[in-house]
Image (cartoon, rainbow, N blue to C red):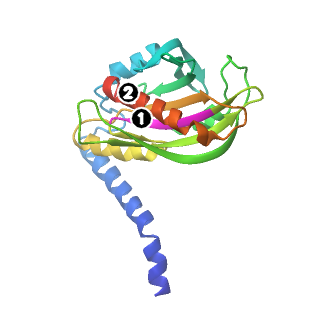
Amino acid sequence: MIFFDKHLKEFPQIAALVLLLLLLAFGTVPGYLVGRWQWQQPQPPATMKQLRQLRQQGLTIPGWQNMKQEEMQIGGRKWSMQVVKKENSQQEAILLLLPQKDPKDQPQVEWTELNGWWSDIYGWQRWDVAQFRSAEFSVTPQGATNSENKVQARFFRAATKTQTFAVLQWYAMPNGGDPSPWRWFFSDQLAQWGKKRTPWVGVTILLPMEPLGKVETTWDEVQSIGKAVQTALMSSSL
């Protein structure tokens, strides 16, 4: 019984590994048989043009005014950096977007690179992370009434010597979002069976907050911005 219980607990991990192997096998064997590797000639997402424009022009968010937008090098990649201001309010936020740049581009946990970066608006300072937790919110696709897309995200407080921010991070996809690249990988493999692709955009929202305060006090506002960004991305770029 001890042996059985031990392996029963390991079943989800084993099942995930088997599924991954099946996806790889079914995705690569047909290409091998015809002498064409799928990862060498991947089909681009249907919204590739919109994704490229997103990096250059930024995102239009209903209810928020775009104060500044520019391409910014962070680590080895170029992001869109926007400063947005809520209409009829003094509330501002920073929106960092990393759109998929080409058919071979994959999310690579860019959150590590962001931990060592800070905008020259506030000086080049490394931020300290605290009060980290997983977060979840849902959005309704444009034109849908009875369906919701769930977004899993990273939520935490980030502080430099001069600024403190509530931070929300995830990879946005057409059917929701997740902070891990794995959900995109499985979604993209399934999409390729139907000769389609799953586009993605890395999202980081930074909302100024009380210096070294409780990040939970900002959740309602951060969640509201997160919903607006995900909805805008699904309707315009994903």
At label 1, counting other C-alpha atoms closer than 10 Å, the crowd grade (few under 14, some 14-19, many 20 or more) is many
Instruction: Give the quadrant of residue 73.
Output: top right
Q: What secondary structure do most residues of the magenta stretch adopt?
A: strand
Q: In whole angstroms, how far apart are the C-alphas of marks 2 and 1?
A: 8 Å
Q: Is residue 105 magenta?
A: no
* Label pair 2/1, CB-CB below 8 angstroms: yes
Residue type at mark 1: give it.
Answer: Ala
Q: Is residue 202 visible in this depiction of the protein? A: no
At label 2, counting other C-alpha atoms closer than 10 Å, the crowd grade (few under 14, some 14-19, many 20 or more) is many
Query: Height in image: 228 above or below 171?
Result: above
Query: Height in image: 88 above or below 45?
Result: above
Query: Height in image: 217 above or below 97?
Result: below
Instruction: Give the quadrant of residue 131.
Output: top right
Identity of the residue drawn at 78% across and 29% down: 161
Residue furthest out toward the bottom: 1
Identity of the residue drawn at 60% across and 25% down: 74
List the residue tagged with mark 2.
Answer: 233
Q: Quadrant of the C terminus?
A: top left
Residue furthest out toward the right: 161
Identity of the residue drawn at 35% across and 50% down: 24
Comparing 171 with 93, the one in front is: 93
Give the side of residue 117 with respect to residue 55, left or right: right
Q: Label 1's element? A: strand
Q: Label 2's element? A: helix
Q: Position of residue 206 (x, y in %)?
A: 58, 29
List the residue tagged with mark 1.
Answer: 172
Q: What stretch of residues is rendered in magenta?
A: 166-174
Q: Position of residue 134 (x, y in %)?
A: 53, 48
Comparing 3 with 168, the one in front is: 168
Q: Is residue 169 magenta?
A: yes
Identity of the residue drawn at 62% across and 32% down: 114
Give the side of residue 25 with respect to residue 124, left or right: left
